[in-house]
Image (tube, rainbow, N blue to C red):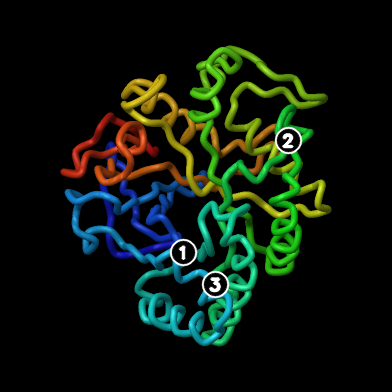
Amino acid sequence: MATRGALSIDGFALVVSVLVAVPTDTNLPVNSTSGEQSIGVCYGMLGDNLPPPSEVVLMDVPKEDLQSLASDPSTASDWVQSNVVANWPSVTFRYIAVGNEVIPGDLARYVLPAMRNIRSALSSAGLQDQIKVSTAVSTGVLGSSYPPSAGAFSSAAKTYMSPILQFLASNAAPLFVNVYPYFTYADNPNEVSLSYALFTAPGVVVQDGQFGYRNLFDAIVDAVHAAIEVEGSHVAIVVSESGWPSAGGTAASVSNAKTYNQNLIKHVGGGTPRRSGRAIETYLYEMFDENQKASGIEQKFGMFHPNKQPVYPISFS
C-alpha cells in the first residue's frame, strides 16, 4: 500500500496507507514498507485534540450503514465509487474490512451479504484483483482456545464464520483478527505470566503437542488457525489490531507498552509455531491516544501523543 504522506519514527520512514473499515469504530491501520515484514499502525479518530485528517489518510463508514450495504447492492456500489474509486490510484487500498468485531452479535447476519456486495462493486470498477474484501473479528469468536490446537469457533460464531471462510477462500482473502494478549493477561494475572504476554519468557511456557509456545500472541493466533482448520479451511490471518496500554489499568505502563510493541515488531516476521516462517501481517494498535474513548486503558494505547510526540521511543527498522 502506498500514499503521499509519511511519518518519521526513530529514523524510519513510515509510509501512510489505509485498511478501510466498513463499518468501523474508526481504527484504521497505516502500513510500513520495510520489505522484511508487514507491520502497520492503527489510526483511531475518537479524540478532539488529534492531528487533522488531512495529515493522515482516513476513510470511514458509520457502523449503522452495514445493514444498507448488505441489503442494497446500489448502496455498496455508491460507497465504492465515492470512497475507493474516487481516490484510486492516488491512494492504493489493499483491503476493505466489512465490520469490526460484530460477530457474533445483532449485526453479524449482515456481514457476509455486505462483503459480497462490496466485492461485486469492486469487480464492476475493475478493482477486484487489487483490493481484498474481508471482516475483522475479535477472539471472542472462539469457543475454545486452550491449548491452541483445541481452538474452535463458538456455536454462535460458527453460523457466520463457516460461510465467511468459504467466501474468503474463494477470493484468496485473509481473515482479520484483533489479537490482545494484554486483556488475556489482565483478566487472568494469576494464571498467565506477564513475561508470557510481553514476549519476554525465557523458554517455552505452553507445550502443545509438537508446538512450543513462548508467547501468548502466538498461542492466540494459532488457536484461530486451528479453528479455521476445523472448518476445513486454510484461510490466512492478518492481525488487524494488537497493542498494549501505557496507563490506566493492570500492568498498563509506558515500559510494558514499549516492550510489547517493540517485541511484536521484531517477532511477526518469523510466524507462529503452527505457521513457522510465514510472516504475520500485523497492525499495531494504535497511532495516537484517543481522549474520547472510555476513560482508563482505552484512552492509552497510543504510541504518540496527539501533538505527535512519542509516548515512548520505538523502532520499525
Report x, y in % for residue 176. 58, 52
Circle 1 residue: 23
The residue indicated by pointer 3 is 130
Question: Where does residue 141 sit, x and y in percent of width and height?
Answer: 65, 46
Figure quadrant of the N terminus: bottom left
Across and down, in percent, residue 17 comes to 38, 59
> Which numbered dot is residue 244?
none
* Quarter location, residue 262: top left
- Residue type for callout 3: Gln
Q: Earlier in the sequence, mark 3 or mark 2?
A: 3
- Dot 3, how many residues are within 10 Å of its Cα: few (below 14), some (14-19), or many (20+)? few
Q: Which SS class for mark 3?
A: loop
Judging depth in this view, the residue of 282 and 50 nearest the camera is 50
| 317 left or right, relative to 140 | left
> Which quarter of the figure is the C terminus placed in?
top left
Comparing labels 3 and 2, the label whose residue is closer to the camera: 2
Check the image and name the residue furthest to the front.
Answer: 106
Please, what secondary structure does the residue beneath circle 1 have?
loop
Whole-angstrom CA distance, mark 3 to mark 2, is: 35 Å
Q: Is residue 209 above or below residue 20?
A: above
Q: In the image, is 15 to the left or to the right of 94? A: left
- Dot 2 amino acid type: Ser
Q: Which residue is mark 2?
A: 144
Residue sitting at x 63%, y 49%: 237
Kindly identify the amino acid type of the residue bearing the numbered disc 1: Pro
Rate crowding at label 1 as few (under 14), some (14 to 19) or many (20 or more) other CA atoms within 10 Å: many
Q: Quadrant of residue 278?
A: top right
- For marks 1 and 3, give the one nearer the viewer: 1
* Left or right: 78, with 118 as reference point: left
Q: CA distance from mark 1 to mark 3?
A: 20 Å
